[in-house]
Amino acid sequence: MVNSKPYVIGIDMGGTNTVFGIVDARGVVLTSDSIKTRKHSNINDYIDELYAGITRLIESIEAQDKIFGIGVGAPNANYYTGMIEDGVNLPWPTPVPFAQLLRDKFNIPVAITNDANAAAIGEMTYGAARGLKDFIMITLGTGVGSGVVVNGQLVYGHDGFAGELGHVIVKRNNGRLCGCGRAGCLETYCSATGVARTAREFLEIRDGESSLLRNIPIDEITSKDVYDAAMAGDKLAKDVFEYTGNILGEALADFTTFTSPEAFILFGGLAKSGELLLKPLRESMERNMLSIWKNKVKILPSELKEADAAVLGASALGWEAKDK
Amino acid sequence: MVNSKPYVIGIDMGGTNTVFGIVDARGVVLTSDSIKTRKHSNINDYIDELYAGITRLIESIEAQDKIFGIGVGAPNANYYTGMIEDGVNLPWPTPVPFAQLLRDKFNIPVAITNDANAAAIGEMTYGAARGLKDFIMITLGTGVGSGVVVNGQLVYGHDGFAGELGHVIVKRNNGRLCGCGRAGCLETYCSATGVARTAREFLEIRDGESSLLRNIPIDEITSKDVYDAAMAGDKLAKDVFEYTGNILGEALADFTTFTSPEAFILFGGLAKSGELLLKPLRESMERNMLSIWKNKVKILPSELKEADAAVLGASALGWEAKDK
């Protein structure tokens, strides 16, 4: 079959950079570039710069008229409405009809969803979830995001906002304050930020104990510092991963009761901590699992190349884009 | 359109009774009957008695050759495999290929699922969930069951066992021992049994406080007794419902993050407690809800007539039955 429009465009809007690329049907990123997300206070200026950047890419590979659709992953983007509903970190006012603005500018079908959902679609199309019909993507970044796939389809829910598993409350009493205004959310413990918070807590509570992390000003400790210290054998840092994996394992065991996934796919910086995180995570998940699922649910790391992952995930949605 | 097979058979296998009936496409139970579930130690004798009972019903309304399919709701029944996998309360050995046994006997297509899933399908076909594409059925009976519907389809999950929300752990520390072998499961608090347990706990802890429930031997208190006492104005009994509604509300707020349902449908004995349960439940759910869903998710009581509900739910699945 000859496809006259063999490419899609993927746009990943992050808090700092907006990365975009042209991707073929096999998931090869043919060319990509980026602009600063927060440079313009007017959304139209941002769209203009994005249009200019993408047009340059299209021309560079002579892909005019070969673009099937545009897929966008952006925070709080709604698949149903095409709106970015709430952009805490964006310089222009929200809600904004982002899909419509792009469609008007490019005259190409556009589909948008939030970044974790885009990652789930990318993983299903090109990554670790190929062939899986029921899985849950967990993104462990600055926050914790998720994308739930049931019967081969991403779950958007009644209003387009399904899959906010980072905001399941894992500590009912005395939980950590979350950016959402509540306390005890999963993402306050199991994100990169959560790992740094745990490290700071442990350093304060375990006052007399030596740790490599004491060489860093306490407010500047990052999850990467904790990882490096743990890899160097630091007991306190290893305990931070143990604590994090334990809470995440409890949560994943609970999540299993919902959609009975074949696997959880872990994505994002923290997911690359290897056995430091995976060992306590697996042990905790199995210890807390309802018996019918014990030793049956896989935990798989993402298979998308990191540099391309965000664009690939967004681009995969481009194949679903429709004219509206 | 003339449908030559306008009826389905619904079979609801409970721990005590197996109720069955013939249902038309509008959800009218034309005729029904029941047998004892636990009378025979051999599954084939049970099937024979069921066959005889159903055949009598079919003949009584001259519905020979008018049955489209048979739907069964049974504990631990698996939609994919047609097996009853684990029957703690059944007198014959499990797993047992229940769908196949019925199909061989009746020569009619058969579909089976667990009782909570059957209830969700019934509610979607004939009840409070008509027209809803995304909802979660919560059955508050001896235990807590659930059926998750996404995009108009029941979620069976990778292995057919999705929707065990009664076994989400709501108390991590010092939780009540659950029949599943773990501790702190939702159903140890928010089932009829859970309500009775809470009443017993409160009676012990609040030693000096008078309560109508003290007129009943403590080990014999049922959720119905607690309901009656609360309706008579008993403070301790009302507090039991407050406590139950509070925990259930926390859980439903968490569940919302998963599939973003339009509504929760409450079914089962405890769901008929009215505002005694619903008021604290609603308040707790909204208090614990992530802001994007505050005051947006409905809590609806089941609309299926109680006497018919189980059979109706099972029968609705009969329309999905296929020859295998």
Image (cartoon, coloured by chain):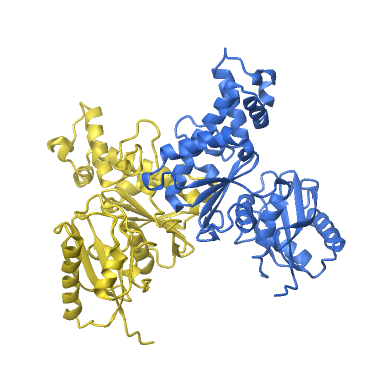
Chain colours: A blue, B yellow
The reply, left or right, for residue A52 in relation to residue B14 is right
Q: How many marks?
A: 0
Query: Which quadrant does the C terminus of chain B fall into?
Result: bottom left
Q: Quadrant of residue A244?
A: top right
Say which residue appears at 55% left-offset and 37% top-offset: A278
Residue B226: image location, x then y, percent:
22, 43
Q: Residue furthest top?
A: A208
Where does the image place residue A259, in percent across and percent down from the top left?
A: 45, 53
Residue A201: percent from left, percent from top: 57, 23
Q: Is residue A135 left or right of residue B86?
A: right
Tell me which corner region of the image, top left, top right, bottom left or bottom right, holds residue B132.
bottom left
Residue B28 vs B75, above or below: the answer is below
Q: Quadrant of the N terminus of chain B?
A: bottom left
Q: Going by the picture, which residue comes out furthest to the bottom?
A: B2
Of residue B294 and residue A299, the one placed in the foreground of this image is A299
Q: Is residue A317 left or right of residue B102?
A: right
Q: Could one spot residue B305 in this view of the protein?
A: no
Q: Nearer the viewer, residue A80 or A32?
A: A32
Residue found 53% across the figure and 30% down from its top: A242
Q: Nearer the viewer, residue B178 or A231?
A: A231
Q: Is residue B113 visible?
A: yes
Whether A223 is drawn above or below A236: the answer is below
Residue nearer the viewer, A87 or A263 = A263
Q: Position of residue A38 (x, y in %)?
A: 77, 45
